[in-house]
Amino acid sequence: MDKGRILLSVTGFNPQRWHELLSAQREVVLAPDGPADPSITYAVVWKQPPNILARLPNLRAVFSIGAGVDHLFNDPGLPEAPIVRVVADNLAGHMTDYIVWRVMDHHRQGMLYRSQQNKKIWHEPPQRAAEDISVGIMGLGQLGRAAARALLALGFRVNGWGRTGRPMEGVETFGGEAGLVPFLNATDILVVLLPLTPATRGIVNYKVLRQLRRANGLGGAVLINAGRGRLQKDADILRALDDGTLKEASLDVFEVEPLPKTSPLWAHPRVFVTPHAAATSDPAHLVAPMLAQMDAFERGEPLRNVVDRQMQY
């Protein structure tokens, strides 16, 4: 089978490096030759221009280099070719590092100690055991399960919530709309790793945050969002922080990115902000499995990590 050419259309994520690594094994182009380029067989994209994928008659698959694929479903010219999420241990490792870091920082009262240092206060608050803290993960996919395993190894109790409540050893799992409130009621630190779909947009809102357990060893509920920015309502998080519904929050993603300089989240004393940096897609680790998938597909093997178009993840 003719391998054809790869269309690379990447905004951010070091497009020059993607081009260098992909073109070492395949012919790569940055734009189609005309409105219906028959030579392009695969597309590697992130926030591609609208309609650039339309009318490519021999397109076999579209590879999304980030953890999310909502940018593809916003494209009015999205073709019918299979959409593949690029999955690599490196990406899961970065996300697990971030989640463990933020959970541990909230657990060991990092915000309090930083405030005390600024004020030159010498005071040791009571310490809590990890086994007394329940971390609830919204979204038990590959990234969520990797984070759950790491947190279990550190002694935390872990809950999980998703569309189906798929079981995981050592984790109390909840599924669907009926399981959401019981999941939240049993959670002290909420970790959000859901995909962004029509069903999950705005799910981290004030009503949901009010269901978190506040009478706990942390002295209040904590939110960590490392999923997608439009899963949350920024104004609702601020409201929850200001009325005591939330004690603290670590936010890597936001409704509008970059986070506007006028946002109160930048200066809030109980918010930790990172610039959508929890798990950056590194082409050095992702190009090889992507090309291996293309080679296997051309040998007649099925694609892996294919997105369900109806569920949009």
Image: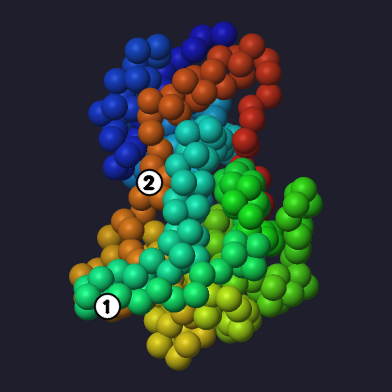
Element marked by disc 2: loop
**Label 1 crowd (10 A; few <14 / some 14-19 / many >=20):** few
Instruction: Kindly identify the amino acid type of the residue bearing the numbered disc 2.
Output: Lys
Element marked by disc 1: loop
Quadrant of res 171: bottom right
The dot on residue 47 is 2
Q: Are marks 2 and 1 in contact (CB under 8 Å)?
A: no
In the rendered view, tell whether residue 312 sits above or below residue 86.
Answer: below
Answer with left or right where residue 312 lies relative to residue 10.
right
Q: Which residue in the structure is indicated by mark 1?
A: 121
Percent position of residue 9, x then y: 35, 35
Label 2 to label 1: alpha-carbon separation: 47 Å
Identity of the residue drawn at 74% across and 74% down: 182
Percent position of residue 247, x then y: 46, 79
In the rendered view, tell whether residue 20 sits above or below residue 304.
Answer: above
Identity of the residue drawn at 61% across and 83% down: 215
Instruction: Kindly identify the amino acid type of the residue bearing the numbered disc 1.
Output: Ile
**Label 2 crowd (10 A; few <14 / some 14-19 / many >=20):** some
Observer-nearest residue: 281 or 189?
189
Observer-nearest residue: 156 or 161?
156
Lower sequence index among marks 2 and 1:
2
